[in-house]
Image (tube, rainbow, N blue to C red):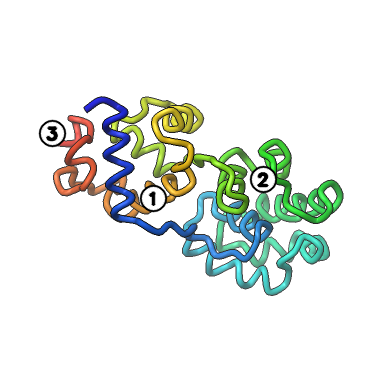
């Protein structure tokens, strides 16, 4: 198969397996999504969903968040890991949202990526899932599977994102990045993976997977 043919096969297979795509981070609005995505760095979605109700019970808006001490935020989010950095980031981004954006999460990549603890991937998730802007957030699952499926040889997530954007139609990006994540968790793990039983790798996986 050519790369475009592989991409078409991946897209068709994933659409059948996951016809509905809902982001696995519980949230109510762009702000609570932003906070949840910040917390998800090096943390499972399941753990984030256990912690955000505790945090949002005290502060679910930037106005409420800046009234908390950074230490109070840190104590609540500690189970998510990296709590000193994340607590400062959440408090800091909340202050900037209030001071520079009228209390609303900004709707541009540049403004989002200027916020503390918000990188390109986090901004992409918010832009795609909160505002419906076409984006292709690449996490470790997507980076790994794009290489495993020979859709990209990118050594970085930035290159993988660029490669995938060239292969897939823009109107599929927002659903597709979630479908790939779901598939990676359910069918195509990093370890203990049997390529012969995988609905996608069995057709287009790298040759070394079958040795």
Q: Earlier in the sequence, mark 2 or mark 1?
A: 2
- Answer with left or right where residue 209 lies relative to residue 120: left
Q: Residue 117: which disc?
A: 2
Q: Residue 211: which disc?
A: 3
Q: Could you tell me which secondary element the residue under label 1 belongs to?
A: helix
Whole-angstrom CA distance, mark 3 to mark 2, is 41 Å
Callout 3 touching callout 2 (CB < 8 Å): no
Callout 3 touching callout 1 (CB < 8 Å): no
Q: Earlier in the sequence, mark 3 or mark 1?
A: 1
Quadrant showing the N terminus: top left
**Quarter of image, res 90:** bottom right
Callout 2 touching callout 1 (CB < 8 Å): no
Mark 3 crowd level (few <14, some 14–19, many ≥20, 10 Å Cα): few
Q: Could you tell me which secondary element the residue under label 3 belongs to?
A: loop
- Residue 93: give x, y in percent of width and height: 75, 50
Residue 118, compared with residue 48, is above or below; it is: above
**Residue at x 37% of width, y 53% of height:** 182
Residue 25, compared with residue 174, is above or below; it is: below
Nearer to us of marks 3 and 1 is: 1
Mark 2 crowd level (few <14, some 14–19, many ≥20, 10 Å Cα): many
Whole-angstrom CA distance, mark 3 to mark 1, is 27 Å
**Residue at x 58% of width, y 49% of height:** 132
Identify the residue under disc 1. 179
């Amino acid at each position: 198969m050519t790369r475009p043919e592989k991409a078409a096969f991946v897209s068709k297979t994933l659409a059948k397996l996951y016809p509905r795509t809902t982001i696995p981070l519980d949230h109510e609005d762009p702000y609570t999504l932003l906070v949840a995505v910040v917390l998800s760095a090096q943390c499972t979605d399941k753990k984030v969903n256990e912690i955000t109700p505790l945090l949002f019970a005290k502060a679910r808006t930037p106005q409420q968040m800046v009234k908390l001490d950074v230490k109070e935020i840190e104590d609540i989010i500690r189970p998510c890991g990296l709590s000193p950095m994340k607590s400062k980031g959440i408090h800091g981004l909340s202050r900037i949202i209030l001071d520079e954006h009228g209390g609303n999460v900004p709707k541009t990549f540049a403004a989002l990526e200027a916020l503390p603890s918000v990188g390109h991937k986090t901004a992409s998730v918010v832009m795609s899932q909160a505002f419906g802007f076409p984006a292709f957030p690449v996490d470790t699952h997507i980076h790994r599977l794009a290489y495993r499926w020979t859709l990209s040889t990118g050594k970085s997530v930035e290159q993988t994102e660029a490669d995938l954007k060239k292969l897939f139609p823009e109107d599929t990006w927002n659903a597709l990045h979630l479908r790939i994540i779901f598939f990676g968790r359910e069918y195509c793990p990093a370890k203990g993976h049997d390529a012969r039983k995988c609905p996608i790798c069995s057709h287009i996986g790298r040759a070394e997977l079958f040795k």
